Amino acid sequence: SKAMKISISELSETTGRIYALQDIGNLKENKTYTFSAYVNVSEIEKYEGASVSGAYLSIRPLNAAGDFNGAPVYSKIISDVTTQDINNGFRRISVNINLPAGSVGARVYTIFKGATGTVYFDGLQVEYGSYKNPFNFLINSGFEFETDHMPNAWVPSNISTETEDYVTITNSFSGSKSMKITGEADSDKRLYQ
């Protein structure tokens, strides 16, 4: 399978870094969230004089206008090569944030800073609560993304909006949507990936 690779071959200053980011919406203010990822540092040479050298995660709250709504928080920094013969070199790190009032989302970052080398990030997830759960292999597991009221990344079997099966905002456990399936005695209805 695949992972995101970040490589830095040379730095000209102690604050040099490369990062990837994504904005996450539909989060609730005054709630705690955890951002986690599996990280493999396959090679690293710390830049002399850098105050931070290594791979880490960051999350920062956003308001409805998409502006920052508080300070960023950071995970533990992996500043040495990860043991390659355990989990193929991948180690899980995480960071928790309690979104302040006025927050509706967050910006998450994977960062490699203050060093040259190669880092891989995989299994990134943001979830409600102050703990990290095992990686969720389902795509669109909360049915938040849909086309014509059918969830993206799911294959329907005997499911149709004509028979009252659709993504709804009436009920939800996590996020703002759920999948409604209306039972029929003579029909085997299911969604699968």
Image: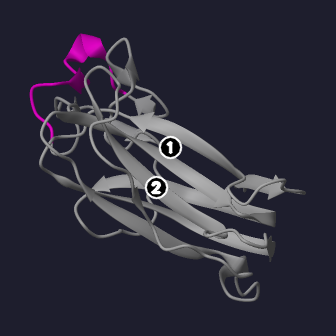
- Residue 97: x and y in percent read 28, 57
Q: Earlier in the sequence, mark 2 or mark 1?
A: 2
Give the number of the mark in front: 2 or 1.
Answer: 2
Along the horizontal axis of the image, is 178 left or right of 106?
Answer: left
Along the horizontal axis of the image, is 148 left or right of 46?
Answer: left
User: Which type of secondary structure does the marked residue at label 2 adopt?
Assistant: strand
Q: Which amino acid is tagged 1? A: Gln
Magenta-drawn stretch contains 163: yes
Overall secondary structure of the magenta stretch?
Answer: loop
Q: Is residue 2 visible?
A: no
Q: Up-down: is 184 above or below 60?
A: above
Label 2 neighbour load within 10 Å: few <14, some 14-19, many 20+: many
Which residue is the site of mark 1? 193
- Residue 47: x and y in percent read 78, 69
Magenta-drawn stretch contains 56: no
Q: Which amino acid is tagged 2? A: Ser
Distance from disc 2 to disc 1, alpha carbons, whole Å, reads 30 Å
- Quarter of image, res 89: bottom right
Q: Is residue 36 visible?
A: yes
Disc ID at residue 58: 2
The residue most toward the right is 9
Q: Which residues are magenta?
A: 158-172
